[in-house]
Amino acid sequence: MNKTIAVTKGDGIGVEIVDEALKVLDRVAEKFGHKFEYKYALIGGAAYDKYHTPLPEETLEICKSSDAVFLGAVGGDKWDSVEPDLRPEKGLLALRKGLGLYANLRPATIYEALKSASPLKDYIVEKGVDILVVRELIGGIYFGDRKTYVEDGVRTAYDVEKYNENEIKRISKMAFDSAMKRRKKVTLVDKANVLDSSKLWREVVKEMSKDYPEVELDFMYVDNASMQLIKNPSQFDVILTNNIFGDILSDESSQITGSIGMLPSASISEIGIHMYEPIHGSAPDIAGQDIANPLATILSAAMMLRYSFDLEEEAVAIENAVEKVLEEGIRTIDIKEPKGEYVKCSEIGTAVAERI
Amino acid sequence: MNKTIAVTKGDGIGVEIVDEALKVLDRVAEKFGHKFEYKYALIGGAAYDKYHTPLPEETLEICKSSDAVFLGAVGGDKWDSVEPDLRPEKGLLALRKGLGLYANLRPATIYEALKSASPLKDYIVEKGVDILVVRELIGGIYFGDRKTYVEDGVRTAYDVEKYNENEIKRISKMAFDSAMKRRKKVTLVDKANVLDSSKLWREVVKEMSKDYPEVELDFMYVDNASMQLIKNPSQFDVILTNNIFGDILSDESSQITGSIGMLPSASISEIGIHMYEPIHGSAPDIAGQDIANPLATILSAAMMLRYSFDLEEEAVAIENAVEKVLEEGIRTIDIKEPKGEYVKCSEIGTAVAERI
Ligand SMILES: CC(C)[C@H](C(=O)O)[C@@H](O)C(=O)O
Ligand SMILES: CC(C)[C@H](C(=O)O)[C@@H](O)C(=O)O
């Protein structure tokens, strides 16, 4: 199989961790007889430094003419004083919009070998944590009207949370379809006791659920969800929610696993060019030291093989190699045992590649 | 001292837990020679059932002519099919607005005797959890414009998150003043990398902080805050945030203590009539069984004595009585030891009153 992959390493540790993932992808290509062509493009702070914009036109073009997009991470305090519209994060938001990446899939699972890393007590974790957050990614308050102005001499600012039924249907379909391949439960998280937009979500999702009689649908207010994730995470299968609540709850979900350096994500577009990236950020404080954990990025590569290229066997080969490495006790510093040894970012990448 | 207290028991367990708190207040009055006059008024579902509105004009009038408002809890599935604008919660929102309760103070602390109830591992909790969430309560997306309509044949809905500098200054002052009486640290939680309203919050709070040179101010994105609360809650002193983020993060904060049946709250108004209520909800599933935990409500009464009536000694008397009861192992079912005994709601109320 011949595939073209747009590779946007971004900032901070993005560079190192993507290099390790490419090492693993190269090994997969070699072993299974595929050809992956990488087209490198700048995004975030790295793009700003060179082109004075966090998403150069050229980068978007490269992504649009590739079969998938593989991203590291963007941002860093280096760009704190850059004007808001040119900050690294704005490049990521523009890329999401530009590719129409409407669904962000963020699985939160606990790795058997890393169970003790969860901040939650054992009796909670033992019941199992295996959640898929399905977050709407190109609508709502992230992309609604916004304005800062002076009203009667008083500084004022607003942002609009707005959704229409088509946006809600599209993301709900993704959630229900995902649930059908999992434990067949969808929890819609909203604030329908206060927000009109949330009421519309409930209405539309209820209608959609008629097409999925096997899926159990329930509703939860966002404040309660933030508690239930800690109290009893095993009750959740698929969490369906809007852009801003998804931002908050997916981070909370990944934190409770204690495996945040391990969690991949996929962003799905209607035009078929999906994007893959680790859940964690660019960690500028440890960048360039070859100590970052590249496993979330390597697992994002597995997700890419599965969802974009339909290469299930190859995806599983990567996932198994990662598990093997963990079981052998090969760890980066963030997931090592309190008194255990640790290896470098590049060493663990090599170790995974060798086990494929 | 003679004080008039508007008592709005509300729904579900609201009725039982308020009765226990009044028992304790009566004992305080007796012992310290005060006179508390209770003016009862309906709110929430109870008011809807009788007057077809969750906040009768009469209730608001009673509250406005009292020295403080003491609330149980509102809501329950019984009113699920009531039209949205008449739901129990709307009564609470209208009361907040009607009294101008702009600041919601929600302390999250771990009771020594209940330490083991936290869902977080001991090594995290041992570093200490003592957070005050200062949530803006009558602005933002809760009270902004909202609309549900059909646009080009497509159902659409929006809600507006809007703030002006005066609203931000008022709540920030509360946060900084609170921090001065605590560990002198304020963390502003927002989403300033995306929202215009959040940028205005940062700007105004930064300006305000000049008046509080002793207070350390830092900034955190809301997604990160939802992780940090679990990962390392001891880093927080005062969390200052808007209405919707405060709704989510204060519930998360209370959950990590494991003592949610123990946590009181105060809502502060500019006109001086403050409101006190437990953090937990109306728990309709256990209502009427005399098994609810009234301690959060009893501790809310202590907060009322302290903040509204300046009766510090009396407030401490209640707090000490509660601690004594806990130390003696007298527990309601929600906080009992796995194999321990438990007492009724009314028994623990009596036990607290007797220890004053
Ligand atoms: C960087 C930021 C704009 C982004 C978001 O809020 O979507 C990030 O937090 C994420 O979740 O991918
Ligand atoms: C009942 C509901 C409207 C309310 C809120 O969202 O403010 C509640 O969750 C709270 O936090 O007091």
Image: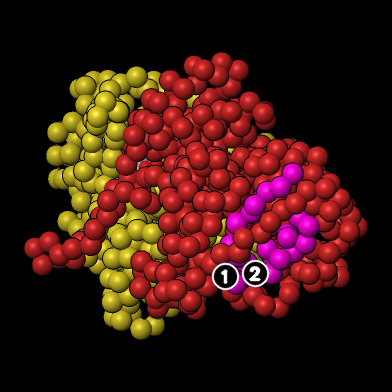
Chain colours: A red, B yellow
| Residue at x 63%, y 26% (from the top left corner) | A180
| Residue at x 48%, y 77% (from the top left corner) | A49
Crowdedness near tag 1: few (<14), some (14–19) or many (≥20) residues, C-alpha within 10 Å? many
Q: Which residue is mark 1?
A: A11
Amino acid type, residue under disc 1 in the picture: Asp
Disc 2: residue Cβ within 8 A of ligand 1's nearest atom: no
Amino acid type, residue under disc 2 in the picture: Val
Above-or-below relation of A107 to A296 = above
Above-or-below relation of A292 to B111 = below
**Is residue A86 visible in the rendered structure shown here?**
yes
| Residue at x 31%, y 56% (from the top left corner) | B136
Dot 1: element: loop
Please state which of residues A321 and B172 is positioned toward the viewer in this rendering: A321
What is the C-alpha distance between the residues marked 1 and 2? Answer: 6 Å
Asked if residue B92 lies in the magenta stretch, the reply is no
Toward which corner of the image does residue B334 lie, by quadrant?
top right
Mark 1 and mark 2 in contact? Answer it, CB < 8 Å.
yes
| Residue at x 51%, y 29% (from the top left corner) | A173
Quadrant occupied by the N terminus of chain B: bottom left
Disc 1: residue Cβ within 8 A of ligand 1's nearest atom: no
Does B305 sit left or right of A308 as displayed? left
Does A281 sit left or right of B251 as displayed? right
Dot 2: element: helix
At which x and y percent is residue A340?
86, 68
Q: Which residue is mark 2?
A: A15
**Is residue A55 visible in the rendered structure shown here?**
no
Does A193 sit left or right of B323 as displayed? left
Residue occupying the far bottom of the picture: B213
Q: Which residues are magenta?
A: A1-26
At which x and y percent is residue B277?
37, 45
Q: Are marks 1 and 2 on the same chain?
A: yes
Does A248 sit left or right of A331 as displayed? left
